[in-house]
């Protein structure tokens, strides 16, 4: 298994281009199942999660063709099967995104329950309960969700929690339902709005995007379209934090800084010198002081940037308290950072980080994508070699992470094993 070797301490310099968002593209690719025509996607990032979604879609019967680098066409005339098997779903929870589109257009779906994952139990009760309210008959048999319906019916849905995945699944399900669906307490993440724009491009009738109440008027069919997803705000945040941790001057391009308001504001409160343009953020060497961070649904501080903040806090002056409110077990980076010398204590769902303890390179490993990214960032500040093992976790969500950081001048290399 490949590993990333970071030789620290290392500074960064120059500019980096952010890829299109994996978390926008995963539901959007699943949404291609809804279209009767050909859907063309551009600038699709070359990531393991995207390849997993493609494998699942091809297994279902979607014809996918690469037109040029990053451009793909998707066409679904007929399904080969209604089943998303455990083998595919267990490697990526976002596979559950096919449930809404399958049920809406093809009236039947058999999708493996995703089960737990490294960061928590992550149930899908909100997806299922609300699809039932839209008329789906759902049973759980042998670890599979079996769902069928004549035609989904519009309904007034209120989510108990603004789940990103549930909002996406229900929005897609509602596009071809009979009548109007209202999703109250919908998630507000920019990826939801992006999915909405994609569905609109296919002819879906959606109002209230960017609000907690989304209305979808069902239509009889959706057509093909061409679409490019938004830039990856989480990837951008990771590079910005990397720049701050290594006291560097870098420019992070090709994403919308508005999508990172909560992160940028928190970083500025902690002393970061940041400049922002329409689609870039420039980082300058800054004295970082400790802060209090609480993860929350958008527009709050994203859980997907929590691990990187813990890494940053190890370099801050003073103590930081970082509290995780979305997932119950999302501190796998902490024992690894401790092995590198960080002074961190876990109390309940908070990490209390005393900044300033010198970090030393070590072999480290995490089973969560963002946690692995945090270890790479820590490697920039550590004395000696940090070997981040099992790079395939990073390959799930960071396009060319080794090359991009090397392009910024980091002493980093990917070692094949
Ligand atoms: C998405 C993102 C993930 C991010 C998360 C929160 C994708 C592919 N993944 O995951 O990177 O960390 O949003 O911003 O976009 N929950 C339930 N029942 C449900 C659904 C969710 O209890 O039916 C709970 C989960 O266990 C979790 C919380 O709600 O504690 C948030 O989950 P959700 O917003 O659904 O996250 P995902 O869509 O899985």
Image (spheres, rainbow, N blue to C red):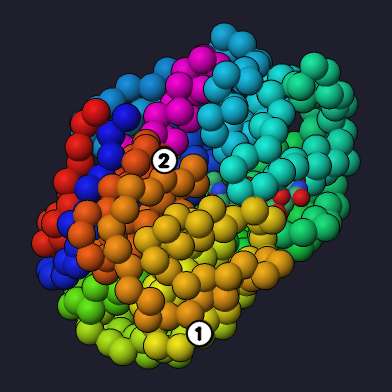
Secondary structure of residue under mark 1? strand
Give the percent coordinates (x, y) of residue 145: 77, 25
The location of residue 24, given as percent across then percent down, is: 48, 49
- Residue at 31% from the left image edge and 53% from the top image edge: 362
Residue bounds of the magenta highlight:
45-62
Asked if the beta carbon under badge 2 is closer than 8 A to the nearest atom of ligand 1, the reply is no
Judge from the rendering whether residue 289 lies leftward or rightward of residue 99; answer left or right.
left
Q: What residue is drawn where x is 83% and y is 58%?
A: 160
Examine the structure image and report whether residue 57 is included in the region drawn in magenta: yes
Quick one: label 1, few (<14), some, or many (20+) residues within 10 Å? many
50 vs 292, left or right, is left
Where does label 1 land, which residue? 319
Q: Is residue 121 left or right of residue 7?
A: right
Toward the top, the furthest residue is 80
What is the total number of numbered labels drawn onto the structure image? 2
Q: Is residue 362 magenta?
A: no
Mark number for residue 221?
A: none
């Amino acid at each position: 298994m490949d590993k990333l070797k970071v030789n620290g301490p290392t500074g960064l310099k120059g500019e980096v281009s952010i890829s299109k968002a994996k978390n926008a593209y995963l539901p959007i690719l699943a949404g291609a199942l809804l279209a009767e025509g050909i859907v063309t996607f551009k600038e699709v990032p070359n990531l393991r999660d995207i390849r997993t979604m493609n494998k699942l879609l091809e297994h279902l019967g979607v014809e996918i063709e690469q037109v040029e680098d990053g451009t793909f066409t998707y066409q679904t005339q007929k399904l080969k099967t209604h089943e998303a098997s455990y083998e595919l779903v267990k490697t990526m929870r976002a596979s559950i995104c096919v449930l809404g589109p399958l049920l809406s257009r093809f009236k039947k779906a058999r999708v493996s329950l995703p089960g737990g994952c490294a960061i928590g139990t992550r149930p899908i009760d909100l997806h299922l309960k609300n699809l039932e309210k839209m008329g789906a008959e759902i049973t759980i048999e042998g670890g599979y969700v079996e769902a069928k319906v004549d035609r989904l019916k519009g309904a007034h849905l209120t989510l108990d929690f603004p789940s990103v995945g549930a909002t996406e699944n229900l929005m897609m399900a509602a596009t071809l339902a009979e009548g109007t669906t209202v999703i109250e307490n919908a998630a507000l993440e920019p990826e939801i709005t992006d999915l909405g724009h994609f569905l609109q491009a296919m002819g879906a009738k959606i109002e209230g995007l960017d609000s907690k109440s989304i209305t979808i008027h069902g239509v009889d069919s959706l057509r093909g379209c061409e679409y490019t997803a938004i830039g990856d705000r989480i990837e951008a945040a990771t590079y910005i934090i990397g720049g701050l941790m290594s006291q560097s001057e870098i420019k992070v391009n090709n994403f919308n800084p508005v999508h990172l308001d909560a992160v940028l504001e928190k970083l500025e409160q902690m002393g970061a010198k940041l400049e922002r343009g329409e689609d870039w953020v420039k980082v300058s060497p800054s004295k970082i002081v400790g802060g209090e961070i609480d993860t929350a649904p958008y527009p709050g501080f994203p859980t997907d940037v929590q691990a990187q903040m813990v890494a940053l806090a190890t370099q801050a002056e003073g103590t930081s308290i970082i509290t995780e409110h979305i997932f119950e077990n999302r501190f796998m980076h902490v024992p690894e950072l401790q092995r590198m010398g960080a002074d961190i204590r876990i109390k309940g769902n908070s990490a209390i980080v005393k900044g300033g303890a010198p970090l030393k390179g070590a072999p480290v490993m995490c089973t969560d994508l963002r946690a692995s990214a945090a270890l790479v960032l820590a490697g920039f500040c550590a004395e000696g070699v940090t070997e981040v093992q099992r790079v395939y976790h990073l390959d799930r969500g960071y396009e060319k992470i080794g090359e991009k950081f090397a392009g910024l001048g980091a002493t980093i290399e990917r070692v094949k094993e």
